[in-house]
């Protein structure tokens, strides 16, 4: 299931305001319909007089002519029916029109409490009614147990709600009934259904990944021709995956997704390559912060990774794991519970990476540290060597060519020949030289600035000039 229709929505501020108006009108009609359905359900449940014999006699708003609202796009593209639309409206109501659910505060006079069968929760700060899966089942099925059983399928992983990360039931305790969990709209679709704008998650404790972006282009990346050739294979897969899997019918033999390992010394362009791949193909690249992912507590590492993979699924993101050997390293012999826990994490990661339909790039300085169970599953293993003389010369000239003044004694040919450092080091030298020139109220880079910058870089690595 793809989200091409969703990914196209990326508007300017002016068009975003226009989209808000379209979305507001669509949801206004949807909530009025929800209120009608809720009132009919309570009338039927309490045996009150009503002209409706079923909630299904309440016709939903016609969205067939709505070409702009996020709700209409979802309903039309995903063929959402009566039940799905009610559940969507329930999940959205606390955010946009909480008073639509006030009917659920109706009390059962016999027990002097709200109706158990209607479900619902009370928030810590939100004074309104928070719907649960039971609320949806009550509205749509009433006392019909068979219908309630059928509705459970809407909350299974195979449904579009879960597959596309639209909404979920947040069940706090595994021992409690499935439908007792809060009915929650995900932040990305809350954004889409209100602004029609594609949601890009920010780094947070529950999403330990950062969006990578760059103003550089492929011409700024100086790589060995063999490396560029291998990267082009990855690019070709991203560009032609659908043709290979669907048009050529190879989907029954090949798994979706692509897994690549970039290895080599620090500063040789691994991160920039992943970022440029995303930029070239119009895909978001997220760098996974391993320090936030790995936890000493059992199950937490898997939970943190699940949050990333669940969010990324069907978005066609490139997931970039830097210094991946810290997380994807060799498994140890199971001498104690701690080792078994670590090996379970590796097995879980292996499975999630294999099941991910997008591109996963792992980067490490030392390939030997990687678990062979992972390396066997990579479609590409690409070595990023330290740059040779010609490449270093080009890196120096590229870095210092942006309108900088250089003293007459600066000789990049000699510098490139003398100092075997990487592109990452050279960028750090550029930063140091710029700040040094500013501190002495000059706009000229001196040769001694460059040499001192190189010394600093070499000292970081325990080397001397």
Image: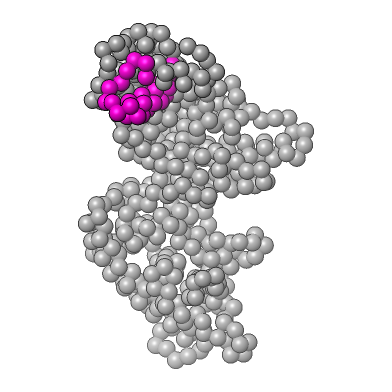
Report the residue at 42% width, 18% height from top: 452
- Name the main secondary structure of what is drawn in magenta: helix
Report the residue at 45% width, 58% height from top: 186
Report whether residue 311 is seen. yes
Q: Is residue 157 magenta?
A: no
- Residue 11: horizontal and vertical position, in percent? 26, 52
- Residue 378: horizontal and vertical position, in percent? 51, 28
Report the residue at 45% width, 53% height from top: 165
**In terms of depth relative to the viewer, which is nearer, 446 or 170?**
446
Q: Is residue 438 magenta?
A: yes
- Residue 267 left/right relative to 462: left
- Kindly indicate the quadrant of the structure image that contains residue 93: bottom left
Report the residue at 37% width, 73% height from top: 31
**In terms of depth relative to the viewer, which is nearer, 35 or 465?**
465
Q: Residue furthest right?
A: 335
- Kindly indicate the quadrant of the structure image that contains residue 229: top left
Report whether residue 358 is seen. no
């Amino acid at each position: 299931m793809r989200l091409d229709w969703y990914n196209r929505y990326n508007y300017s501020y002016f068009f975003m305001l226009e989209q808000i108006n379209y979305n507001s009108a669509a949801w206004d009609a949807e909530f009025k319909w929800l209120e009608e359905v809720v009132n009919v359900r309570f009338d039927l449940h309490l045996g009150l007089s009503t002209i409706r014999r079923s909630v299904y006699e309440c016709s939903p708003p016609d969205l067939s002519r709505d070409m702009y609202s996020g709700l209409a796009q979802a309903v039309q593209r995903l063929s959402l029916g009566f039940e799905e639309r009610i559940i969507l409206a329930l999940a959205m109501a606390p955010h946009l029109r909480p008073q639509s659910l006030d009917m659920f505060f109706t009390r059962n006079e016999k027990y002097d409490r709200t109706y158990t069968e209607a479900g619902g929760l009370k928030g810590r700060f939100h004074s309104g009614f928070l719907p649960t899966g039971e609320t949806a089942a009550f509205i749509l099925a009433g006392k019909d147990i068979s219908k309630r059983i059928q509705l459970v399928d809407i909350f299974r992983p195979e449904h579009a709600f879960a597959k596309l990360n639209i909404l979920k039931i947040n069940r706090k305790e595994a021992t409690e009934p499935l439908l007792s969990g809060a009915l929650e709209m995900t932040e990305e679709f809350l954004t889409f259904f209100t602004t029609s704008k594609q949601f890009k998650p920010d780094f947070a404790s529950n999403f330990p990944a950062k969006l990578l972006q760059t103003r550089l282009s492929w011409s700024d990346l100086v790589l060995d021709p063999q490396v560029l050739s291998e990267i082009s294979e990855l690019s070709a897969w991203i560009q032609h995956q659908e043709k290979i899997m669907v048009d050529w019918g190879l989907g029954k033999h090949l798994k979706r997704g692509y897994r690549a390992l970039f290895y080599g010394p620090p500063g040789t362009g691994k991160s920039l390559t992943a970022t440029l791949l995303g930029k070239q193909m119009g895909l978001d690249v997220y760098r996974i912060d391993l320090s936030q992912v790995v936890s000493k507590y059992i199950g937490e590492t898997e939970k943190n990774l699940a949050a990333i993979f669940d969010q990324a699924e069907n978005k066609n993101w490139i997931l970039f794991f830097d210094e991946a050997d810290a997380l994807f390293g060799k498994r140890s012999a199971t001498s104690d519970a701690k080792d078994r826990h670590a090996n379970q994490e590796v097995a879980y990661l292996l499975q999630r990476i294999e099941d991910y339909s997008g591109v996963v790039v792992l980067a490490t300085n030392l390939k030997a540290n990687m678990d062979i169970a992972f390396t066997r599953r990579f479609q590409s293993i690409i070595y990023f060597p330290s740059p040779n003389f010609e490449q270093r010369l080009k890196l120096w000239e590229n870095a210092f060519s942006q309108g900088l003044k250089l003293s007459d004694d600066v000789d990049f040919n000699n510098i490139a020949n003398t100092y075997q450092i990487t592109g990452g080091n050279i960028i750090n030298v550029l930063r140091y030289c710029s700040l040094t020139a500013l501190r002495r109220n000059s706009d000229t880079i001196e040769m001694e600035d460059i040499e001192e910058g190189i010394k600093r870089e070499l000292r970081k690595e325990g080397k001397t000039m």
